[in-house]
Image: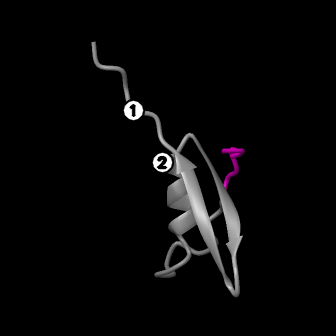
Amino acid sequence: MGCTNRRVAVRNALHTGGRGLALVAALSDCWETVPHPPSGKTVRAELTTPNRE
């Protein structure tokens, strides 16, 4: 996956929507969006789990 590390700003803390990509950016190692016609997008993210020894 060709993901990038992008930051997303939450514009207004009181709004009830618009935090999805900010959460993805905060929790993932990297992420990307891919257009999903006719009017949507697919979000792909990579997560790393800690090594258990």
* In the depicted structure, whether residue 18 falls above or below residue 22: below
36 sits to left or right of 13: right
Residue beneath the point at 56% across and 40% down: 29
Extent of the magenta region:
1-7
Crowd around label 2: few <14 · some 14–19 · many ≥20 (10 Å): some
40 sits to left or right of 48: right
Image quarter where the N terminus lies is: top right
Residue that carries the numbered disc 1 in the rendered image: 49
Where is residue 33 drawn, in percent x and y?
Answer: 67, 62
* SS assignment at label 2: helix
Amino acid type of the residue that numbered disc 1 sits on in the rendered structure: Thr
Where is residue 47 drawn, in percent x and y?
Answer: 48, 41
* In the depicted structure, whether residue 9 falls above or below residue 3: below
Looking at this rendering, what residue extends furthest in the left direction?
53
Amino acid type of the residue that numbered disc 2 sits on in the rendered structure: Leu
- The answer to whether residue 5 is magenta is yes
- Does the CB distance between marks 1 and 2 fall below 8 Å? no
Residue beneath the point at 70% across and 82% down: 37
